[in-house]
């Protein structure tokens, strides 16, 4: 199976899972409304980058595996990604996703939480379809379990940081490893394990995914401040209003004197605690970000992680899939959405 066929099979498999939810007429599901079924499939049907499923396939092929055997794992990681977006948007009070109103805005918080839960149950169905031996199956469940656990911990840290005045870079990195990087790491590791990669190859691809994920999130943090809302699908400045401790915000605060830092922190975290920030405070923070070149500093660090991801693949034999993984890392850094 070539990569184009793989992509088609993954997309078809994903659409089949969504159709199963929509068509499900079991005694339990048929009792719920069509509105709820629509809520379950809403985010996935909006499309997306499909980066993580492609990483699974490329990693499998790069170690000499049968790429079609990785399709169920690719579906599993995309389901994890989509259900986490549903829950994250509720926790972050984000009103848009992929250029449209967020699920909880359309259907309400209750339906959105449960829709995310339904998508999560489908992860198990996908994993059970992975054709491999018992030892590998155990590894696969462990990889997915770790990713799910760390994703939740990362999101909890991110939410908790909103009420913290002083978060350091090390704490930020720990947070984004859980929130974002672990799923990239799981994607590349799953592909390597299913493909029968050696211990060195599995470790190399795991490192690739981890560093790629850190780079991806740092670039995301920048786009949340300077990106085009029509391209990113999210309003500029939302991270400031939500008091996110993203890398560019930390870099900006570190780049000003103590007196000014205390003043802006007081306005953001004390005077308007629990409230939307006035536009003037958001504009002041944006001015500090520009003045301190915080976005440029963030991109410099993100580039280092991108390069680490690419270097991780040196031990792999030359192949189209290896080149594709190298290109994915570069695109994660260069992207505008």
Image: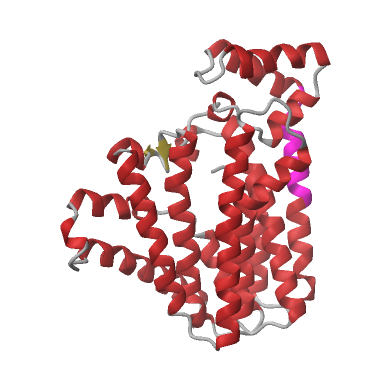
| Residue in view at x 79 percent, y 75 percent | 315
* 196 and 111: which is toward the camera: 111
* 10 relative position to 18: left or right: right
**In the image, residue 102 lies at what x, y percent?**
38, 39
Q: Examine the rendering and report whether any part of residue 333 can be seen.
A: no
Examine the rendered structure and indicate whether residue 254 appears above or below residue 104: above
Horizontal side of 169 relative to 147 (left or right) equals right
Span highlighted in magenta in the image: 292-304
Label total for image: 0
Question: Overall secondary structure of the magenta stretch?
Answer: helix
What residue is drawn where x is 50% and y is 18%?
275
Residue 287: where, in percent of width, then height? 67, 17
Residue 216 forms part of the magenta stretch: no
Residue at image location 61% in from the left, 65% down from the top: 186
Location of residue 5 (image quadrant): bottom left
State the residue in front, 181 or 50: 181
Relative vertical location of residue 227 with respect to residue 252 in this rendering, above or below = below
Task: Residue 93: name its quadrant.
Answer: top left
Q: Mark yes or no: residue 229 visible.
A: yes
Q: Residue 312 location in percent, x, y?
A: 77, 66
User: What kind of colouring is applied to the model shown?
Assistant: secondary structure
């Amino acid at each position: 199976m070539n990569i184009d066929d793989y992509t088609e099979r993954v997309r078809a498999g994903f659409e089949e899972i969504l159709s199963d939810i929509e068509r499900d007429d079991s005694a339990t599901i048929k009792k719920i409304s069509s509105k709820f079924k629509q809520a379950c499939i809403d985010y996935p049907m909006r499309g997306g980058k499909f980066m993580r499923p492609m990483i699974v396939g490329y990693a499998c092929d790069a170690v000499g595996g049968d790429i079609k055997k990785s399709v169920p794992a690719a579906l599993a990681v995309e389901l994890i990604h989509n259900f986490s977006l549903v829950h994250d948007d509720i926790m972050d009070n984000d009103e848009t996703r992929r250029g449209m109103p967020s699920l909880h805005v359309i259907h309400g918080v209750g339906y959105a939480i449960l829709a995310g839960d339904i998508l999560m149950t489908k992860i198990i169905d996908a994993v059970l379809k992975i054709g491999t031996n018992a030892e590998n199956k155990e590894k696969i469940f462990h990889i997915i379990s770790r990713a799910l656990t760390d994703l939740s911990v990362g999101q909890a840290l991110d939410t908790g940081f909103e009420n913290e005045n002083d978060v350091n870079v090390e704490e930020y990195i720990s947070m984004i490893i859980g929130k974002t990087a672990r799923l990239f790491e799981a994607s590349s590791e799953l592909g390597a394990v299913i493909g029968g990669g050696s211990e060195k190859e599995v470790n190399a691809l795991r490192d690739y995914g981890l560093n790629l994920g850190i780079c991806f999130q740092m670039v995301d943090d920048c786009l949340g401040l300077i990106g085009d809302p029509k391209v990113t699908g999210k309003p500029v400045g939302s991270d400031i209003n939500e008091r996110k401790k993203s890398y560019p915000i930390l870099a900006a605060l570190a780049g000003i004197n103590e007196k000014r830092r205390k003043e802006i922190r007081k306005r953001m975290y004390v005077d308007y605690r629990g409230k939307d920030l006035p536009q003037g405070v958001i504009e002041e923070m944006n001015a500090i970000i520009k003045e301190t070149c915080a976005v440029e500093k963030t991109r410099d660090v993100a580039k280092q992680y991108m390069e680490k991801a690419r270097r991780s693949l040196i031990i792999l034999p030359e192949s189209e899939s290896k080149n594709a993984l190298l290109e994915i890392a570069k695109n994660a850094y260069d992207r505008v959405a």
